[in-house]
């Protein structure tokens, strides 16, 4: 954890508070519609599938598949300067929703769509823990 973290952090809101609280506890959560059962991320006040306002937060397995990825070769924020080029992956969780993050523990040239990954929690400040991903270990399915 760094007290001088100089990258952008999520803005806390009532909608994302449960997600950020769970991340600090090492859990990856998403909303699930209580009417139709569809899991969703990011948080929303109504279900895009059935328009129900009834939802609950559920724990996920933290596992998923790289659906897509790209590499940033430009520095948009000073904090990323030493990491250029850095990856941004779109991970489809086993529970359905997709989320953007970074993939750690693998060289950019080895990232592939279809790669199995698991959530990794990076405490970057006393208040903020970011959800990132790492490749699944052999036999960790």
Image (cartoon, helix red, strand yellow):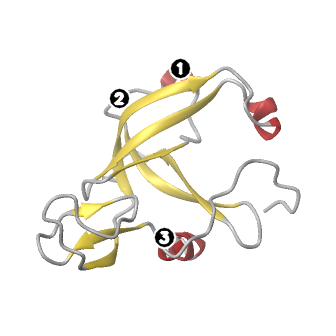
Q: Nearer the viewer, mark 3 or mark 2?
A: 3
Q: Residue 2: which quarter of the image? A: bottom right
- Other residues around mark 3 within 10 Å, as few (<14) / some (14–19) / many (≥20): many
Name of the residue lying farthest toward the right? 4
Local SS, label 2? loop
The numbered dot on residue 59 is none
Q: Residue at x 44, y 66 (%)?
A: 28
Q: Nearer the viewer, residue 14 or 136?
A: 14
Local SS, label 1? helix
Local SS, label 3? helix
Q: Residue 67: which quarter of the image? A: top left
- Other residues around mark 2 within 10 Å, as few (<14) / some (14–19) / many (≥20): few
Q: Which residue is mark 2?
A: 113
Residue 118, image x, y percentages = 43, 53
What is the CA distance from the residue labelled 1 to the residue labelled 2? 12 Å
Q: Which residue is mark 3?
A: 19
Q: Nearer the viewer, mark 3 or mark 1?
A: 3
Question: Viewed as shown, does residue 66 lie left or right of 123?
Answer: left
Residue 132, image x, y percentages = 55, 51
Label 3 or label 2, whichever comes before in sequence order: 3
What is the CA distance from the residue labelled 3 to the residue labelled 1? 31 Å
Label 3 or label 1, whichever comes before in sequence order: 3
Q: Residue at x 17, y 66 (%)?
A: 51
Q: Is residue 21 above or below residue 3?
A: below
- Other residues around mark 1 within 10 Å, as few (<14) / some (14–19) / many (≥20): few
- Number of numbered labels in the structure image: 3
Q: Which residue is mark 1?
A: 109
What is the CA distance from the residue labelled 3 to the residue labelled 2? 25 Å
């Amino acid at each position: 954890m760094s007290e001088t973290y100089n990258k952008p952090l999520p803005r806390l809101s009532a909608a994302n508070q449960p997600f950020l609280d769970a991340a600090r506890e090492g859990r990856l959560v998403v909303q699930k519609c209580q009417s139709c059962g569809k899991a969703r991320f990011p948080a929303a006040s109504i279900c895009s599938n059935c328009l129900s306002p009834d939802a609950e937060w559920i724990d996920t397995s933290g596992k998923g598949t790289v659906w897509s990825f790209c590499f940033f070769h430009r520095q948009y924020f000073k904090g990323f300067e030493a990491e250029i080029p850095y990856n941004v992956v779109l991970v489809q969780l086993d529970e359905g929703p997709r989320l953007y993050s970074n993939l750690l523990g693998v060289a950019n040239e080895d990232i592939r769509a279809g790669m199995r990954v698991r959530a990794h929690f990076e405490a970057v400040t006393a208040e903020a823990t970011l959800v990132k991903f790492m490749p699944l270990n052999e036999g960790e399915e």
